[in-house]
Image: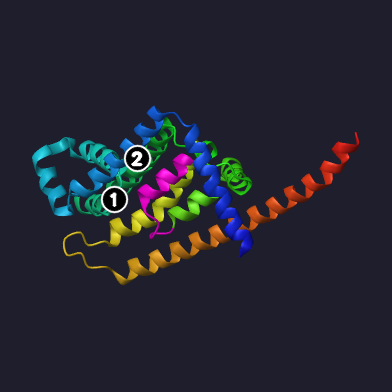
Amino acid sequence: MNSVVSTLRAVRGAVIATFSSVSRVRLVGSLAAIVILVAVALLVPVPTAVQLRDWATSVGPWFPLAFLAAHIVVTVFPFPRTAFTLGAGLLFGPVLGIPLAVTAATISAVIAVLLVRAVGLRLDRTVRHPRIESLNARLRERGWPTVLSMRLIPAVPFAVLNYAAGVSSVRVLPYALATLAGLVPGTAAVVILGDALTGNVSPLLVLISFCTASLGVAGLVYEVRVHRRHHRERTVEAEIDEPLRLTR
């Protein structure tokens, strides 16, 4: 318990010290971006699947591209993407709806990461603590299994994971591929089994969600154990190398 408290205190001190060194312009810009995201998420209504169907009628043959663009832009913000996933099944069927929904969500996830990093929000620049730095280094070296596992868990908010990946050092290409692979099972299940008109939840959809969530949790547990083992090994190596370095 004492070690946990000391770690939290050290992290708090590191955050305060780091933020004090950040320029006011960058800090104000970051806070403004966060406020805008929250305001947009709270004030702008998310279109329902039925509204998307009405929109399709007015747009005409260009609607698949319009749907793709709208899905990308809207879900960059902290909106639930369920309406678009259900709408993809309702409007285009599984053959076209699944590729559209998965492609749009993947592109949106990558854009969100790039925007967060363009603002300058990075974990390695904000928090200076050995455990945080070790975790961030692990994500930089092998972040895709963590991203893949979390994408498989339906309860993990889509936008929150995007922003969290943005502040970490996970590489963009592995992140994009892991996102693509992790979104396919859940998106396909919702497109095929989701009832956009009545909102009824299929028992098979619940079963598939439970199975993918179980795989995701198992993957996270494995990655945490591997990370802890590597962290212990590096700590031991550092303790062994330190006396040798001092004797040279």
Please tell me how crowded label 1 is: few (under 14), some (14-19), or many (20+) other residues with Cα within 10 Å. Answer: many
Q: Residue at x 38, y 60 (%)?
A: 155
Residue 48 seen in this snapshot: yes
Residue 171 seen in this snapshot: no
For disc 1, the marked residue is 81
Q: Which residue is outermost to the right?
A: 247
Majority secondary structure of magenta residues: helix
Is 144 on the left or on the right of 166, as rendered?
right
Q: Is 94 above or below relative to 136?
A: below
Between 138 and 235, which is closer to the camera in this rendering?
235
Between 220 and 86, which is closer to the camera in this rendering?
220
Q: In the rendered structure, which amino acid carries the disc numbered 1? A: Arg
- The span shown in magenta is 153-167
Q: Is 221 above or below relative to 44?
A: below
Q: Residue at x 20, y 59 (%)?
A: 196
Please tell me how crowded label 2 is: few (under 14), some (14-19), or many (20+) other residues with Cα within 10 Å. Answer: many
Q: Residue 161: say if magenta.
A: yes
Q: Distance between the residues labelled 2 and 1?
A: 10 Å
Is 208 on the left or on the right of 47, as rendered?
right
Q: Give x and y (percent) for residue 113.
A: 42, 38
Q: Give x and y (percent) for residue 139.
A: 56, 44
Q: In the rendered structure, which amino acid carries the disc numbered 2? A: Ser
What element does badge 2 sit on? helix
The quadrant in which the C terminus is found is: top right
